[in-house]
Amino acid sequence: MEATKLHNVIHDAIDEEENVDLKVKVTALITLIQQNNASEIDNTIEVIKEDLNESTFNTYSPSNYKILEEINGTTFLGDQALNKIKEILSSNSYNTAKIISELKSFIDERDAFIKTLTTLRDSLNTLGIDPHYNEENYELGLLLPSNNNYDSIKVITKELNKWDKAIKTYRELVGDSTEDTRITLVNNGSLEFFTENIEQVALCVTFTIERLVKLYKNVLDIRTAWSNLKATGLPKAQEKGIAKHEKDTYNKEIDSIVSDVIKNFADKNIEGGRLNELKISVKGHTNYIAKCIDNGLVIEITPPELSEPKILSEEETEENKKERDKAKTEFEARLKKVNNIKDSLKAGKEILGLGKEVFKMLTTGEEEDEEVDNEEEE
């Protein structure tokens, strides 16, 4: 795994413990259970629930969460930690001694894990390996599955070329430069490639993924209904109609996604003829992203780590009031976009990387790939 991203995960885990102080709260919960203080037990559980529901690990990027899995830390943080505590409480509801024993074991294991991370963080700091963060731009990552389909230079290069072309199109669409996409980070030990982009490009890609996730689920719903009808003896002749409905649903939504991307994100200064060309390109890239979801590739968007403007920590005066209000408004607007992106990606987290090929029979074969490849040759 990549050392700076590992340091990032370590930093976030230690930061969560310092802010949430879960060890203290679970220890207090154990004492309350021993005292059979029912009302305070409920209050403490609610506080723990609120804290862990707000955990940064609940909206963690797939590549960072993968690192957390590799260091065996998922059970100790965020929703997974809350689920573990709930499981201990519910599965032993009539055995107080066992609840106490398992809660102690959990918190001791978690404490040992945090202490190990703290030691490792100090070592990384000593070696000059800083956490991997972006403070201004958004980071887009293309995460390829670790399987035999992506083990050749030719295939990997083809995917990166498609990804490069997609990013260039979205950049031009929002009025940014179309220079070659620079890889800013490669996650060692896996096929993960990262690049930095402006906010509008990240919003374009996020919007597209969010709509494709909804379409993915819609197609699955159609297939579930279809399967149920077949079980009741659906006439063979009607199957073609349902298959056509799937394809029509896909094509209609792809057209709608492309239209909305152009409407919501296109720079107003793009000349009409070029805008039509970009619209065709966006459709090809939208189909490409759909194929990425099908093939188990993950497109990851990581927002920057926003720091509150320094002026907001200053005492308000008549001289700085206007500047403070402006800085606050701009900061809150950026923060809202960051949170919206996190929420959007969280909603689709359960399907990304599955590789179930839901869209496979609905796209128009190789047309989208050829379109992207042809653009690269121009």
Image (cartoon, rainbow, N blue to C red):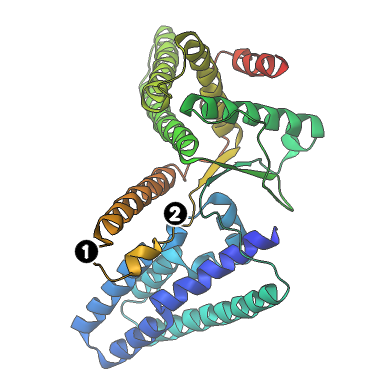
On screen, residue 352 above or below 378:
below
Query: In x, y percent, where is residue 21?
Result: 41, 79
Q: Nearer the viewer, mark 2 or mark 1?
A: 1
Dot 1 amino acid type: Glu
- Pointer 1: what residue? 318
The residue at 41%/78% (across/down) is 22
The mark that comes first in sequence, 2 or 1, is 2
Is 320 on the left-hand or right-hand side of 228? left
Label 1's element? Answer: loop
Q: Residues within 10 Å of mark 1 (few under 14, many from 20)?
A: few
Query: In x, y percent, where is residue 358?
Result: 51, 28
- Pointer 2: what residue? 59
On screen, residue 282 above or below 134:
above
The residue at 35%/82% (across/down) is 95
Dot 2 amino acid type: Thr
On screen, residue 105 above or below 278:
below
